[in-house]
Amino acid sequence: MCTCIDARKTAGRCYRMSGSFIYFIILNAGFLSAYNWDQLNLSPSHLPFYFKNNPGIEKHCQDDVECPYQELTGMEKCWGYEPDCDKSHHYANPNCTGDNRHWAKNKEEQEYKFWSTADFGMLLERKKELRMYCKPNSKEDSSLQCTKYLRYCRAANIYLDFSSKPITKSNERDRYREDVLGPGLVGGHCELDDVNLRAQGEHKSPLQSWFAEIQHFSSLEFYPSKDENCDMVFNKPTYLMKLDAGVNMYHHFCDFVNLYASQHLNNSFNTDVSIIMWDTTTLPYGDFFSVTWKAFTDHPIIPLSDLDGKKVCIKDAVFPLLARMRYGLYYNMPLMPGCVGSSLVKAFSEHVLHRLNVPQAGPHNEKIRVTLLSRNTKYRNILNQEELVKAMKSDGELEVSVVEYNRLMLFEEQLNNSHNSDIFIGIHGAGLTHLLFQPDWAVVIELYNCEDPSCYFDLARLRGLKYITWEKKKKLTQEDEGHHPTLGAHAKFTNYAFDVMEFMRLVYKAADHVRNHPQFIQARKRKSAFEEKTVLKDEL
């Protein structure tokens, strides 16, 4: 007897629920008297794009007097990966006014390369690569479709056999074992293109492709769609994820950015989905940012060890883009110089903030909000931090907060602080990843990059923010040469003091940018108008 995950059971059989994709529900459930439009749960600015890619839902909204989004339908909007999508209809386009440093022949090529490698154009390239590696010949058949090198795959009615290579009984400490799914242990009832599938191994690596897990995909004699030979059945759409370090925000948010990008490839932002964490050990996975999963699923994350010893069938499976792909977002990616603003990264930021209900309380009418990120670690501390904070607080325009982001502060609270920071200051470290969630008008100051100049500069460029770092090394004091455990002297393994006047020069430079940013000016006007109306209403 099979175990059904989120399924209805009738007469001992498991039947698929209509929890697959919202698009399917709308087209096949016209008899519904009402549709819960709140379940879309998308940022209002994203809805015209969603409707354009889901015409069935758009039509339903137009015909439903209860739909609150009718004004957002019928618009010529596109993310950039859709057929015949004109750039004038994009969510946003990059600003490529800077020097390309000979990476491109002209401005047009510079903008295109940034767009196609760091923006929604990257997803257009992945969509072009999609190829059917296991072809269905009937509705009951399985299917496997992947991009080049198996960096992203989606499958229907697949079979995974975890009964041969134990996980919970193994002493292995490798989270990405490649021997779990050998020949005959993964497959589906479909027509397999085995030669071309096995030729996709060039990027085989734990966080670069799914080749190790899918290379032995085989054509089966039985039908996983009929739950044959299945101990456990996943009826909801299911994402299988190999994760980077959950204790480091910079690395873990590579996971989340790529999951969001994969949702675009899958054209589904439904949260009634299962997520399986592909971890081939029973070691604990420290996840300091686990609340972020709420932006993607309504359900607890399922560790792979829960499937140990079982034969598993998945109705709708997605193997998403991974955190450390070659030329992927955003770990070690070669980012086109001179360009700022990936609409994909901007949309990701807005998507997470919307679904986690993080509000924007500013900007303040007469203040610029400054957050200084303090570190309580062995290295990269600011030795004269109190002096720098005192100097900022002496300026009445600056509203200064000093925060320490650690496990004692809820991540939702951290996001709220960062999203409401017009200027965010910190020395080189993963905490600067919070720049992803600053408002569009904001500035990030990486006080000192510790001889790693590209990491957060590139991340700020992706997010579309102004980036400032220390400019005059003579006005910086290094405590000692640094003490890397194996490499010796190292700029990231020591502490620093900063000249106060030079520090304030950079802060004022950042404040000027914020003060004069068009979106900051507009937001201030909107807030002032709202406050005036509120006061008038109270007086009446």
Image (cartoon, grey):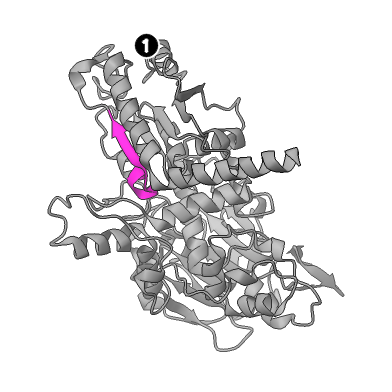
Q: How many marks?
A: 1
Please, which residue is most extreme toward the right here?
A: 11
Examine the structure image and report whether residue 107 is included in the region drawn in magenta: no
| 18 horizontally vs 347: left or right | right
Compare residues 486 and 387 and report the one nearer the observer: 387
Q: Quadrant of the C terminus?
A: top right
**Residue drawn at 34 percent across, 37 percent down:** 513
Q: Quadrant of residue 165?
A: bottom right
Find residue 65 and report its horizontal and vertical position in percent: 74, 74
Vertical order, 498 against 450 (above or below) = above
Find residue 118 and report its horizontal and vertical position in percent: 34, 57
Q: Which residues are magenta?
A: 459-469
Vertical order, 256 against 423 (above or below) = below
Find residue 489 and report its horizontal and vertical position in percent: 23, 19
Q: Quadrant of the N terminus?
A: bottom right
Indicate the secondary structure of the residue bearing disc 1.
loop
**Residue drawn at 68 percent across, 38 percent down:** 535
**Residue drawn at 52 percent across, 56 percent down:** 180
Vertical order, 417 against 152 (above or below) = above
Is residue 187 visible from the viewing direction of this image?
no
Pointer 1 residue = 384
